[in-house]
Image (tube, grey):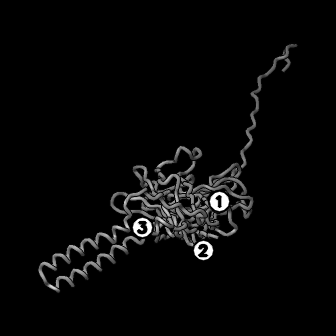
C-alpha cells in the first residue's frame, strides 16, 4: 500500500498445503484347509484387493484351542498372492484363522474361521531326512553289507503342546526292525523340547519352526574273511578228554568192588549201566571243547541281504504315561 510516498508491506500468512494420503485399499483374506495327514494340517491362504492378488506381505495363522489363542505359523505371500503353510495340531477341535498384516497401500484383513478336528495325539512328530548315501527312492537307505549309512531325525513339537510345558521335556530316540548283524546309534540319543524358542533358532521364530534334530547311524557287517586261531594248547598238562574216560572208569571199578563184596548181581548190573551213562555224557560234553580247540570259532556271517522296514521312535514320559511317536524308512541291504 502506498501512503504519502511510503511503501507499507502487509504481512500475509503463508499458505500451507496438506496433501491427503491415499487411503489403503481394503483386502480380502481367504483360508482353506487341505487333507489332514495325522497331525499335520496343510493350509492355503489367498489375499486379494479389488480382484487382484496382493503379492507381498505376510500372513499369520492363529488357532482358538481350548479357550486360548495360539499363533501357529507365519508365511510370506508369493507372487500369486498365496501362501501354503502347514501346521501341526494337537488332538481336539481347532478354529483356524489367517490374518494379513497389511502393507503400504493395502489394509489388513482376517479370514473366516476354518474348523478342524484332530483325533490323533500329536504332541510331537518324528521325521527322517538327508539320507547318506542318498537314494532316488523316498525315505530309503541302501547299503552294501559292511557299509555304514546315516540320516537326520527331526522331532517337531506342536505349538499347542509346547505352550503347555512348564519345564523342558526330553525324548529318547531308538530304532526297531533292523536285520541280524546291523545296529543303530543316535547322536544325541536324547533331544530336549522347550516351551520357549531355543537359543539356536533365529530371533523371533517360533519354537516349532526350529525343532531339535539328531543324527542316526546305521551299521551293517560283512562276513569275516579270516578264521580265528584256536587257543594254544597247554604243555604237558593232563588232557580233559582223558579224564572224561578215566574218571567214569575209576568209579566203575569202585562200584564193582563194592558189588563183589555184597555179592548182589543186581547192584553190579546197575553200576555197569551207570558207568556207561556217565561215560557217554562225559564224551558228549567234551565234543564242543574238542572242536573249538582244534578248529576254532566259526566265521562271522554278513548282514543278510533284503529289504527291511525300520521304525524310528521318540519316547518321553512325564512319570505317569509314556508319549511315543514314530516314523518308518526302508533299509535295503545288498
Q: Which residue: 25% across, 81% down?
A: 272
**Labels 3 & 2 near each other (Cβ < 8 A):** no
- Residue 209: horizontal and vertical position, in percent? 57, 54
Q: For the residues carrying marks 3 and 1, which lies nearer the camera in this image?
A: 3
Q: Which mark is residue 132?
A: 1
Q: Residues within 10 Å of mark 1 (few under 14, many from 20)?
A: some
* Residue bearing mark 2: 306
Mark 1 or mark 3, which is nearer the start of the sequence?
Answer: 1
Count of numbered tags:
3
User: x, y percentage for residue 312?
Assistant: 52, 64
Q: Position of residue 99 (x, y in %)?
A: 59, 57
Specify the quadrant of the image occupied by residue 142: bottom right
Q: Earlier along the polypeptide chain: callout 3 or callout 2?
A: 3
Closer to viewer: mark 1 or mark 2 = 2
Identify the residue shown where x is 81% and y is 20%. Answer: 9
Q: Which residue is mark 3?
A: 289
Give coordinates of residue 332: x percent, y percent.
62, 70
Q: Is residue 44 left or right of residue 248?
A: right
Amino acid at each position: 500500500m502506498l501512503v504519502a510516498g511510503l511503501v507499507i508491506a502487509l504481512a500475509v500468512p503463508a499458505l500451507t498445503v496438506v496433501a491427503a494420503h491415499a487411503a489403503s485399499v481394503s483386502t480380502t483374506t481367504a483360508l482353506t484347509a487341505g487333507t489332514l495327514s495325522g497331525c499335520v494340517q496343510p493350509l492355503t491362504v489367498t489375499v486379494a484387493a479389488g480382484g487382484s492378488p496382493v503379492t507381498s506381505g505376510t500372513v499369520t495363522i492363529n488357532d482358538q484351542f481350548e479357550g486360548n489363542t495360539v499363533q501357529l505359523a507365519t508365511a510370506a505371500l508369493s507372487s500369486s498372492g498365496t501362501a501354503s503353510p502347514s501346521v501341526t495340531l494337537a488332538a481336539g477341535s481347532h478354529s483356524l484363522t489367517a490374518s494379513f498384516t497389511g502393507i503400504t497401500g493395502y489394509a489388513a484383513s482376517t479370514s473366516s474361521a476354518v474348523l478342524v478336528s484332530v483325533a490323533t495325539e500329536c504332541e510331537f512328530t518324528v521325521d527322517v531326512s538327508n539320507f547318506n548315501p542318498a537314494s532316488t527312492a523316498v525315505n530309503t537307505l541302501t547299503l552294501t553289507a559292511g557299509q555304514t549309512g546315516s540320516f537326520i531325525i527331526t522331532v517337531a513339537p506342536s505349538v499347542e503342546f509346547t505352550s503347555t510345558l512348564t519345564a523342558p521335556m526330553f525324548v529318547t530316540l531308538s530304532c526297531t526292525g533292523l536285520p541280524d548283524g546291523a545296529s543303530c546309534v543316535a547322536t544325541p540319543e536324547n533331544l530336549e523340547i522347550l516351551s520357549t524358542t531355543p537359543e539356536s533358532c533365529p530371533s523371533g521364530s517360533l519354537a516349532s519352526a526350529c525343532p531339535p534334530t539328531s543324527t542316526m547311524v546305521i551299521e551293517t557287517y560283512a562276513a569275516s574273511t579270516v578264521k580265528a586261531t584256536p587257543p594254544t594248547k597247554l604243555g604237558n598238562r593232563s588232557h580233559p578228554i582223558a579224564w572224561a574216560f578215566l574218571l567214569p572208569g575209576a568209579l566203575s571199578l569202585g562200584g564193582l568192588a563194592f558189588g563183589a563184596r555184597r555179592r548182589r548181581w543186581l547192584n553190579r548190573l546197575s553200576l555197569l549201566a551207570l558207568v556207561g551213562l556217565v561215560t557217554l555224557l562225559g564224551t558228549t560234553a567234551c565234543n564242543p571243547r574238542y572242536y573249538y580247540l582244534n578248529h576254532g570259532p566259526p566265521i562271522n556271517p554278513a548282514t543278510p541281504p533284503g529289504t527291511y522296514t525300520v521304525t524310528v521312535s521318540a519316547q518321553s514320559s512325564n512319570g505317569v504315561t509314556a508319549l511315543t511317536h514314530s516314523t518308518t524308512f526302508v533299509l535295503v541291504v545288498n
